[in-house]
Amino acid sequence: MSKPFDIVVHGATGFTGRLVVEYLLRQYPNSNPAGSGLRWAMGGRSAAKLAAVRDELGAPADTPLVVTDSSDPASLQALMAQTRLVLTTVGPYQLYGNELVAACAQAGVDYVDLCGEPAWMRHMIDAHEAQARASGARIVFSCGFDSIPFDLGVLLLQTEMKARFGQPAQRVRGRVRKMKGTFSGGTAASLKATMAAAASDPGVLALLRNPFSLTPGFEGPRQPSGNKPELDEALGLWVAPFVMAAINTRNVHRSNFLLQQAYGADFVYDEMLVTGAGEKGQAIAQAVANDKSMGSDAGPQPGEGPSREEREAGYYDVLFLGHDSAGHSLKVGVTGDRDPGYGSTSKMISEAAACLLLDSAATPGGIWTPASAMGDRLIARLQAHAGLSFRVED
């Protein structure tokens, strides 16, 4: 029996959830299901608040509303019966995601989120991957700025390396060249929750320190720590620690793992922020390394975020530089046209959901990364609709 919805946006009344709804209204309107191929609903714990947000956003009065409470087993069961995929923006996921992932894995319902919590993700892999494979549920974590531009940027680089030189790049550097915008309050909250979990559980700390924490049974070569400023020998520029590297690098290694070591069993990857040349670049790199604001209470709180003008003024530009064992090199650039934490992220997770449902029928059940589940199909969607650009640079 068919279900009434293809997608339920769980957390539609939150800041990022609202942005997702705004994007779906523009790109995949329910009033034109034949054209978009998607039927979607707004989900949240309060029907009254859902209705108020629907009206605030100017959505049609008949936009479907679904009460979704991940702490209520009956509500979760009802949700599973109504939708093919759950798109959730409700983090920290280690606090609010356990029951939802378990329900999706059990019921064969697809799932996408914005998770940047590697220890929790490993716990979910251990607990639910076998069930997801059996039920057909495709569970894809990290479908926002962490980690889509990085996961897919490396995938494109390695695809081009093999096409041009017959082998993948053994060493890849991810370098954030430019970025304007803020990280989300949810990202900051997730970091705090992860640090709290690590303080009480040594096993969590061990997972956070392991670059191969998301590749059960596989340990690759030693990886660069990326935790202090350095002069990048390949670029001749100073680079600083990049706050999202701890999750992005783990996802990239998991993609390699799920793609049967398509990047090589000896693959080495790191991410850093480019700060410039000379003494000025060094000073900025040191300042970035000393900045602890992400873990403080001064940043954005969950449910808060920048204005529309600030989101539209944001952008990012990431370089991927690969070298193979024969001395060949290649560069790939990935850019986004909105601030990374909100404007671009809301478009990326929406297109990931669409890609999984409309373009990826061959992807079987399991716990995936964006690159391994959707690959170049997602690159095409992001370039066509979401303001991202992926290109090989000469």
Image (cartoon, helix red, strand yellow):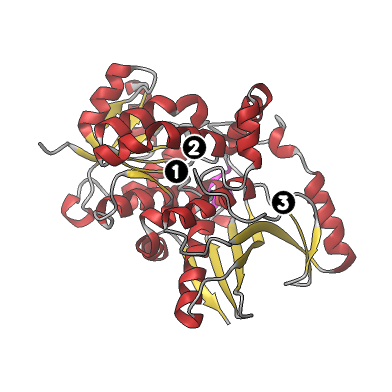
Image quarter hosting the C terminus: bottom right
* Residue that mark 3 sits on: 225
Task: Tell whether 173 sits left or right of 234.
Answer: left
Label 1, label 3: how far apart the Cα atoms are: 23 Å
Task: Tell whether 176 sits left or right of 213.
Answer: right
* Residue that mark 1 sits on: 141
Residue 121 is labelled as: 2
Q: Which residues are magenta?
A: 306-311
The nearer-to-camera label among 2 and 1 is 2
Q: Amino acid at mark 2?
A: Met
Q: Nearer the viewer, residue 242 or 25?
A: 242
Q: Residues within 10 Å of mark 3 (few under 14, many from 20)?
A: some
Percent x, y of residue 85? 29, 40
**Residue 371 picture quarter:** bottom left
Q: Amino acid at mark 3?
A: Ser
Element on which disc 3 rests? loop
The nearer-to-camera label among 1 and 3 is 3
Q: Residue furthest left?
A: 1
**Residue 69 picture quarter:** top left
Q: How many marks?
A: 3
